[in-house]
Image (cartoon, grey):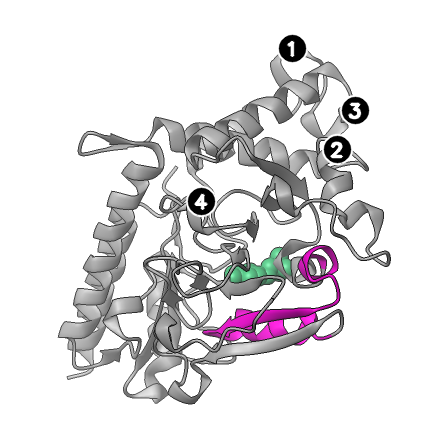
Amino acid sequence: MNRPYNFSAGPAAIPEEVLQQAAAEMLDWHGSGMSVMEMSHRGKEFISIYEQAEADLRELLAVPANYRILFMQGGGLAENAIVPLNLSRGGTADFVVTGGWSQKSVKEARRYCSAHVAASAQADGFHRIPDPATWQLSAGASYLHLCSNETIHGVEFQELPDLKALGSDAPLVIDFSSHVASRPVDWSRVGLAFGGAQKNLGPAGLTLVVVREDLLGRALPACPSAFDYQVVAEHASMFNTPPTWGIYIAGLTFQWIKRQTEGGLQGVAALQARNVAKARLLYDAIDRSQLYVNLVDPACRSRMNVPFLLRDESRNEAFLAGAKARGLLQLKGHKSVGGMRASLYNAMPMAGVQALVDYLHDFEKTQA
Ligand SMILES: *Cc1c(COP(=O)(O)O)cnc(C)c1O
């Protein structure tokens, strides 16, 4: 079956092999007589799925032994509250605001702690990342939050800041929802990373948290037990029923990632190489055209989410209709920025990006 190319920002495309395997196992998982959705989360079948998924993720992202992997619920937005409930100690937390998602994070954190904006790119229309040397870090901050890939504004940290070198002892918290597993993570710079699964790992409903062990056990008394990282870690993500189906599909996705190869590379390194090539193909096509424009500083353009505008906005509807007719789906931009957005997550093959680039070219020619 030839499926269309889906450029949705999330929930987003899932590798076809993963969907096929899930379909084949839907009624009877490995001779158990049950669908994964029907299994007890404490039964040996599901425990084996869970343990394999955790081990594969640890390997793929090279998560060090002193970090815990938690499978939670609530999505990235719930983490905007869960992180301050766990880490702020009611004190001050610093935020670097580089787009719509980090903006939301500060707003939510204000309900639980004193949230200080250490740097913001809002005045620049979120088209660049403020130089870390200019960040106004608070003395004694309980953590610093940033969104390492801004899904709406298309801005990505190509390198995470070294807070120690900036004179801060605060742990770095990253929201990596929309580029997790698209590139390696420098754990030496990260205290906690969180992300919803529905961009790059699987279905909505699963939230991944990777947290350094020394950050456990700091939750405010008001923190719900199900959201207390220490409680969740002590119960191996089974304090309450975890999102079993999401963990299963994410686990199949981890296996798919492990099988990927590119120019002698494997796993996340292979995907990174492919993602670099995919992003370059699309940005080059946009930059060369007279009709399309991406306003983000090339030094911090996202490999995953490529927002672009048509210089003639009256052509937007025609552009989207023509794209759909060619099997290029969900290219409409986020309502807060308008225009278009192509999300090039891991599951988007090079052929899909090539098909989009061909369409950009053909559509522009019809406008002459
Ligand atoms: C999608 C997204 C979120 C929100 O996730 P929900 O699952 O809707 O709560 C948060 N942060 C980033 C960077 C995202 O891309």
**What x and y, as percent, mark residue 340?**
38, 73
Q: CA distance from mark 1 to mark 3?
A: 16 Å
Q: In terms of image quarters, where does ligand 1 lie?
A: bottom right
Q: CA distance from mark 4 to mark 2?
A: 22 Å
Q: CA distance from mark 1 to mark 2?
A: 31 Å
Residue linked to disc 4: 187
Task: Say which label, 4 or 3, has the lower sequence index.
Answer: 3
Front label number (1 vs 3): 3
Task: Say which label, 4 or 2, has the lower sequence index.
Answer: 4
- Number of on-image labels: 4
Front label number (4 vs 1): 4
Front label number (4 vs 3): 4
| Three-letter amino acid code at the position of disc 3 | Ser
Residue linked to disc 1: 31
Q: Nearer the viewer, residue 180 or 193?
A: 193
Quick check: marks 1 and 3 in contact, CB under 8 Å? no
Which residue shows up at 54% across the image and 69% down it?
101
Image quarter of residue 297 = bottom left
| Three-letter amino acid code at the position of disc 4 | Trp
Q: CA distance from mark 3 to mark 2?
A: 19 Å
Quick check: marks 4 and 3 in contact, CB under 8 Å? no
Give the secondary structure at mark 3. loop
Q: Point out the stretch of residues depicted in magenta.
A: 82-110
Quick check: marks 1 and 2 in contact, CB under 8 Å? no
Q: Residues within 10 Å of mark 1 (few under 14, many from 20)?
A: few
Residue at the farthest top position: 31
Q: Nearer the viewer, residue 154 or 107?
A: 107
Residue linked to disc 3: 40
Task: Say which label, 3 or 2, has the lower sequence index.
Answer: 3
**What x and y, as percent, mark residue 234?**
75, 33
